Image: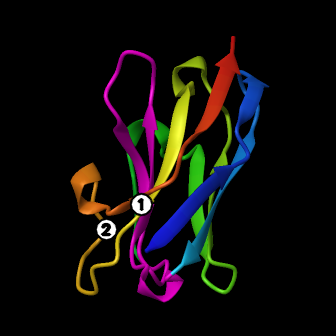
């Protein structure tokens, strides 16, 4: 089993920045691809970005391209999401996710990820 814990959420004004962290514990050697998803009130959980185990493959949802940066430090078993130029529409609960499939590729589908964190709230005021 793998446990994921997010941190770094909070309240920020539009145009500001936040850095989210996702710390993995347990069977971390089995973790392959990781990703961030978000869920706004009244909406379904949506893909934000994903990164392969080596960091060589990264995918961003169009609305965050150029503003968000995903990274991971495998030595620390931690993934990060640097969020810049935040907008009110970025307000959501942000979840980190991980998969443990050896031959999988990064995916925008939530069903591809077996492990999930509890979420961290990000609120952007206008």
Q: In the rendered structure, does residue 54 fall within the stretch colored magenta?
A: yes
Corner quadrant of residue 124: top right
Report the Cα–Cα distance between label 2 and label 1: 6 Å
Is there any visible trace of residue 109 in the rendered image?
Answer: no
Residue 68, percent across and down? 58, 48
Judged left or right of residue 13, residue 87 is: left
Label 2 with label 1: CB-CB less than 8 Å: yes
Lower sequence index among marks 2 and 1: 1
Quadrant location, the N terminus: bottom left
Number of numbered markers:
2
Colouring rule applied to residues: rainbow
Residue 90, percent across and down? 54, 28
Kindly state the secondary structure of the residue where label 1 is placed.
strand
Q: Which residues are magenta?
A: 27-56
Quadrant location, the C terminus: top right
Is there any visible trace of residue 53 in the rendered image?
Answer: yes
Q: Can you say whether 120 is above or below 5 in the image?
A: above
Pick the residue in front: 28 or 13. 28
Q: In the rendered structure, does residue 1 fall within the stretch colored magenta?
A: no
Kindly state the secondary structure of the residue where label 2 is placed.
loop
Residue 11, percent across and down? 75, 25
Q: Which residue has dot 2 on it? A: 106
Q: Can you say whether 67 is above or below 91 in the image?
A: below
Residue 79, percent across and down? 60, 66
Judged left or right of residue 24, residue 75 is: right
Q: Which residue has dot 1 on it? A: 50
Q: Residue at x 51, y 53 (%)?
A: 117
């Amino acid at each position: 089993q793998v446990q994921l814990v997010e941190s770094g959420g909070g309240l920020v004004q539009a145009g500001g920045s936040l850095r989210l962290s996702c710390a993995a514990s347990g069977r971390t050697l089995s973790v392959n691809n990781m990703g961030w998803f978000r869920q706004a009130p009244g909406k379904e959980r949506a893909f934000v970005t994903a990164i392969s185990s080596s960091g060589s493959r990264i995918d961003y949802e169009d609305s965050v391209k150029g503003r968000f940066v995903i990274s991971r430090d495998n030595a620390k078993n931690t993934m990060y999401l640097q969020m810049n130029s935040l907008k009110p529409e970025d307000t959501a609960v942000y979840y980190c996710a991980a998969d443990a499939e050896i031959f999988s590729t990064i995916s925008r589908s939530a069903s591809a990820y077996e492990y999930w964190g509890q979420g961290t709230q990000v609120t952007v005021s206008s």
